[in-house]
Amino acid sequence: MILHRPRRNRKNQVVRNLVQETHLIVNDFIYPLFVSSEVKDKQEIPSMPGIFRFSPNALLREMEECLNLGLSAFALFPHIAEHLKDNSASESWNEDGLYLKTIKTIKEKFPEALIITDVAMDPYSSFGHDGVVENGEIVNDKTLEILAKMAIAQAQAGADIVAPSDMMDGRVGFIRKALDDKGFTNVSILAYTAKYASGFYGPFRDALDSAPKFGDKKTYQMNPANSREALRELELDTLEGADFVMVKPALAYLDIIRVFRDNSHLPIAAYNVSGEYAMVKAAGQKNWIDEKRVRDEILLSIKRAGADIILSYFAKEWAMDNC
Ligand code: PBG
C-alpha cells in the first residue's frame, strides 16, 4: 500500500492553486529603464529585444503605460554622450544634465512613481569604470566623495531611493551620512551588496555604451566563486545603514539570495540582469524554448529563493500578461 501520494495535491488546477507556495505579483517588480539624449524617440537595444533607450518624452509615455499596469517602481539609468564623460563623472551632478532633469520632470508628472536612481560612475566615466582611475587603478576613497555628490544631486532632483551599484568599500555609510547632513533623511538606500564580476552584464553595457575601456571590474566586483564573502558584504551594508540589500546577478546566484534571506531581516532585492534577459529572448526568438513559460519559471525561482523584490527587464511584459 502506498500511504503517501504527493500527486493527490497536484490532481487538478484548483488543488494546485491551493497548495502553491510562491506567487508573483506586480508589486514585486522594479522595472529598469534607460534614458538617452542621443535618440529621437526610442531605439531598441540589439542585444535586448523589447528594451529601449528612450528620449525623455518617450520615457514619460513608457512610464505612464507601466503605471496603468500597476507597475510603479523604476530603476532609471542614463545613457550619456561620449563627449560628456570624464574621470570624475562630473556630468553626474550637472543639474542641467539629462539624468537629473529627467528625474525632476518625472516627479512633477508622476509623483506616485517610485524612482530608484543609479549611483555609480561608469555611465559618466571616460574609462567605463565605477571609480576614479589613477595609474590604472580604481581608487576607493576619492570615488566615495563623487558618489556622495551624485547621491545628493539625485536626492535634490527627487529620487526616492538611491542605489549604489559601484562596490566601493564604505560607500553605503558614506552616502548615508552625506544625505543626512543635507537633510535627506527620508531618501532610502538600496545597496548592490553582493554584486559579482559577471559576464551577464554584457547587454547592459551595450545599452549604456559603458564597457570598461581597459581591464575588468574584478578589483571591486565579487568573485563568482565566493559565498561567505557575500555575508561579509551583507554585514557591512547592514551596519552602514542600507534599507534594502541586493544580490546581482540573480539566476546564477540563487544560493546567495537564499543565504541573504536566512541571514538578514532587511528586504532582499535581486537583479535579473541584462544577460539573463538576453538569453531567454534569443532562445525564444529561435523557438528553442517557450519564452514566456521560461520567463515565469525564472522569475518564480528568484522569489522562491528568497527575494522580496525583483529588478527585471521582463517586468513590463509580465505585467501586461498578468494584470
Ligand atoms: C554598473 C552597473 C552594471 C549593471 C548595473 N549597474 C554593469 C556593470 O557593473 O558593468 C548591470 C545591469 C544589467 O546587466 O542588467 N554600475
Image (spheres, grey):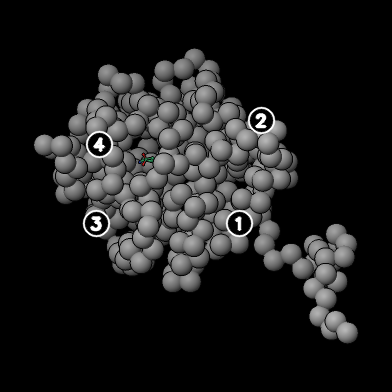
Snapshot quadrant of residue 98:
top left
- The answer to whether marks 3 and 1 mark residues whose Cβ atoms lie closer than 8 Å is no
Residue 244: x %, y % from top left: 43, 58
Snapshot quadrant of residue 208:
top left
Q: Which badge, 3 or 4, is on the more N-terminal residue?
A: 3
Distance of label 3 from label 4 (alpha carbons): 23 Å
| Residue that extends furthest to the top in the rendered view of this protein | 40
- The answer to whether marks 2 and 1 mark residues whose Cβ atoms lie closer than 8 Å is no
Residue situated in front as seen by the camera: 272 or 82:
272
Residue at which label 1 appears? 301
Residue at which label 4 appears? 215
- The answer to whether marks 4 and 1 mark residues whose Cβ atoms lie closer than 8 Å is no
Residue 165: x %, y % from top left: 36, 46
| Type of amino acid under label 4 | Gly
Q: Which badge, 4 or 1, is on the more N-terminal residue?
A: 4
Q: Residue at x 39, y 45 (%)?
A: 198
| Type of amino acid under label 1 | Ser
Pointer 3: residues within 10 angstroms few (<14), some, or many (20+)? some
Residue 289: x %, y % from top left: 69, 39
| Type of amino acid under label 2 | Lys
Distance of label 3 from label 1 (alpha carbons): 31 Å
Distance of label 4 from label 1 (alpha carbons): 33 Å
Residue at which label 2 appears? 286
Q: Is residue 317 above or below residue 307?
A: above
Distance of label 2 from label 3 (alpha carbons): 45 Å
Pointer 4: residues within 10 angstroms few (<14), some, or many (20+)? few
Q: Residue at x 59, y 53 (%)?
A: 28
Q: Which mark is residue 170?
A: 3
